[in-house]
Amino acid sequence: MKFQFKYDINLACRVILQENLDKIGIPYEISGMTEVQFKGHVSHEEFRKLELSLKKYGIEIIDDPKSVIVQKIKEIIKEIVYLEEKPDNSKISAYIAERMNLSYGHLSKIFSEVTYTSVENFYVLQRVERVKQLITEEKLTCTEVAWKMSYSSVAHLSSQFKKTTGLTPRAFQSIIERRNSSGSSSSQLQSK
Amino acid sequence: MKVDSLFILLADDDEDDCIFFRDALQEIRAKTDLTIVNDGSQLMQYLDNADNRVPDLVFLDLNMPVLNGINCLVEIRKKSRLKELAIAIYSTSSSDENVEEAFINGANIYIQKPNDFSVLKVILEHVITLNLQYNTSGLKKENFLLNINNIKSDEVSKT
């Protein structure tokens, strides 16, 4: 038997986090997508144990302050990409700076230092990633996606997609479809 | 999410291309370790040995003796241990059939080998930072497709 599936990565992450945090038995609050606050004292051993058990799922605890900032910027960008009412492209930098309460110049410098890419590039990448999802999983047309993602036109969407991936949205769609039907895709679970 | 050095594996039987690749890789910003194998069966031997570190990114020439690039690709994608492995095809050809065949068989990136050193540098820098984003930003690996060909050196200065 073979079947296709889709998943909500944020929900999956949250459930894994909760299950592992519950094991420690100290009250906590998940504040934001990638932040947890303990409401009591956690011993060093307990914290180590948590760190190890989360690592299994690819969840890493960050302690370097620059990485924390980068992670927060990434979360904000992902949020923007999923917003129904997006801020104008020209206002993204101001939006991020305001949310982080730090100057944009400072933020973008740290971001490039840690990721070797710019905040702008990361935003475009996330946007195109969302487009990929919408055209393959939700099976939306480019016109629908352009509207949903606040692109000024289908042509703009197509050219940003092509510039970022080297493929047209149509070619991308067709490759993913053919991968799924040939059974060589890693997005399939096989069971007997 | 600390960025340690990235482990890159190159499978290519052309000695000049390997040197060209190694020199370009040394000039990019991200820290990398490179291992080179000279044909497909050497590559599979390397990857099958569970004691070896799994690479962050594999560059695969299509035209190699013994086991060619597409055969390797198909073999790699059959192994659950290597499911997450990012694979870049690195080939002189840029025919639509080759590009399509590579992507359908599970390649993430297709690069047409450039002749210009500065172009190669820019490409490697781009590919490696993008791969890093896929590994550190929770992006879906199945949707990681990137096609790079026909980049002229005068376009490079803009990026």
Image: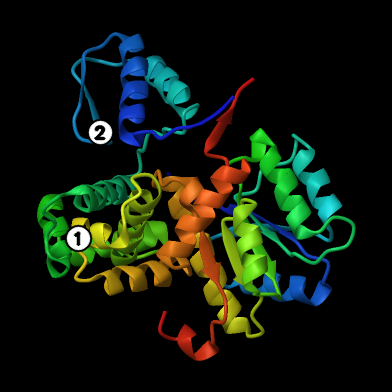
Residue plotted at (46% across, 21% down): A53
Relative placement, left or right, of B131 versus B49 is: left
**In which quadrant will I find the N terminus of chain A?**
top right
Q: Which residue is mark 1?
A: A147
The image shows residue A102 at horizontal and vertical percentages of 14, 56
Residue A16 in which image quadrant: top left
Residue plotted at (76% across, 51% down): B72
Residue A104 in which image quadrant: bottom left
Direction bottom: furthest residue: B154
Chain on which label 1 sits: A
Residue plotted at (38% across, 44% down): A137
Q: The residue tagged with tag 2: helix, strand or loop?
A: loop
Chain on which label 2 sits: A
Mark 1–mark 2 Cα distance, whole angstroms, equals 32 Å
Q: The residue tagged with tag 1: helix, strand or loop?
A: helix
Q: Is A44 drawn above or below residue B53 in the view shown?
A: above
Residue plotted at (35% across, 70% down): A158
The image shows residue A115 at horizontal and vertical percentages of 40, 58
Q: Nearer the viewer, mark 1 or mark 2?
A: 1
Q: Answer yes or no: is residue B29 visible.
A: no
- Check disc 1: other Cα within 10 Å, few if <14, some if 14-19, many if 20+: few
Amino acid type, residue under disc 2 in the picture:
Glu
Work out whether mark 1 precedes mark 2 in sequence or the reverse, and give the earlier one: 2
Relative placement, left or right, of A164 versus A82 is: right
Relative placement, left or right, of B63 versus B87 is: right
Counting labels gives 2
Q: Which residue is mark 2?
A: A35
The image shows residue A192 at horizontal and vertical percentages of 64, 20
Q: Is B6 drawn above or below residue A26 in the view shown?
A: below
